[in-house]
Amino acid sequence: MNRVRSQGSWVIVLTLILALVVSIVPLPTGLEPWRPEWTVLVLIYWSLALPERVGVGIAWLVGLFQDVLMATPLGAHALGFALAAYLTVQLYQRIRNVPVWQQAITVLLVLLLVRATLLLAQGLVGNPIGDWRFWLPAVSGTLAWPLVFWLLRFLRRNYQVR
C-alpha cells in the first residue's frame, strides 16, 4: 500500500526543481517584471492534486530554497509559500471542483497574498519597496495558471503520480 501511495514522487520533486530553475533564468529587462511565480504555481497545483503529500512543510522547504536562489531575506518566500499551501490545502475540495478559469481567480488571490508577504518582508529588513510592477507576477501567474494546470495534470496522469 505504501508503494502505491508514494508512486511518482520523483515527478513532484522534478517539477519543483524545474520551477526553481525557471525562476532564476535571465529574461530581457522588459519582461522581467512579468515573470510568473512558477514555483508557487507548481506548489499550488500539487497541493490541489495531492494535498496529503504536498503541503505546508514542503512549501516551507521549497520557499527556503527560493529565498537562497533569489537572495531575498531568509524566510520571506518560505512564509509566502507556506501560506499559499495552507490555503490551497484548506480549500482544495472547493477549488478542484470548478473550471480552470475560476480556479485562476483563487490563484490570483493566493499569488497576491504571497506578493504581499514578500513586500512585508522587504519592508521589515529595510529594502526599498517597489512600484506597481511588483504586483505583475501575480497577474502573469494567473494568466499562466491554465498552462501550468494542464501540463502538470498531464504529467500526473501520464506517470500515475499518487
Image: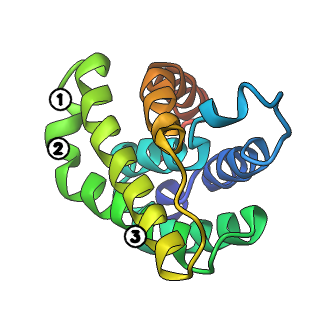
Q: Secondary structure at mark 2?
A: helix
Residue 107 at what x, y percent from top left? 33, 38
Q: Secondary structure at mark 1?
A: loop
Amino acid, disc 3? Val
Q: Quadrant of the N terminus?
A: bottom left
Between the residue at mark 3 and the residue at mark 2, the CA separation in whole angstroms equals 17 Å
Q: Which label lies toward us, 3 or 1?
A: 3
Write down the quadrant of residue 103 in the picture. Answer: top left
Between the residue at mark 3 and the residue at mark 1, the CA separation in whole angstroms equals 22 Å
Return the mark for residue 93: 2
Which residue corresponds to the image point at 55% horizontal and 79% vertical from the top-left? 75
Q: Residues within 10 Å of mark 2 (few under 14, many from 20)?
A: few
Q: Secondary structure at mark 3?
A: helix
160 in relation to 149, above or below: below
Q: On the picture, is 84 further left or further right than 54?
A: left
Q: Name the residue nearer the viewer: 152 or 112.
A: 112
Which residue corresponds to the image point at 51% horizontal and 27% vertical from the top-left? 140
Verify CB contact (< 8 Å) between mark 3 and mark 2: no
First reached walking from the N terminus: tag 3 or tag 2? 3
Return the mark for residue 97: 1
First reached walking from the N terminus: tag 3 or tag 1? 3
Q: Which label lies toward us, 3 or 2?
A: 3
Colour approach in the figure: rainbow
Residue position for label 3: 56
Between the residue at mark 2 and the residue at mark 1, the CA separation in whole angstroms equals 7 Å
Residue 65 at what x, y percent from top left? 69, 69
Residue 18 at what x, y percent from top left? 75, 45
Q: Name the residue nearer the viewer: 81 or 148.
A: 81
Verify CB contact (< 8 Å) between mark 2 and mark 1: yes
Verify CB contact (< 8 Å) between mark 3 and mark 1: no
Q: Residues within 10 Å of mark 3 (few under 14, many from 20)?
A: many
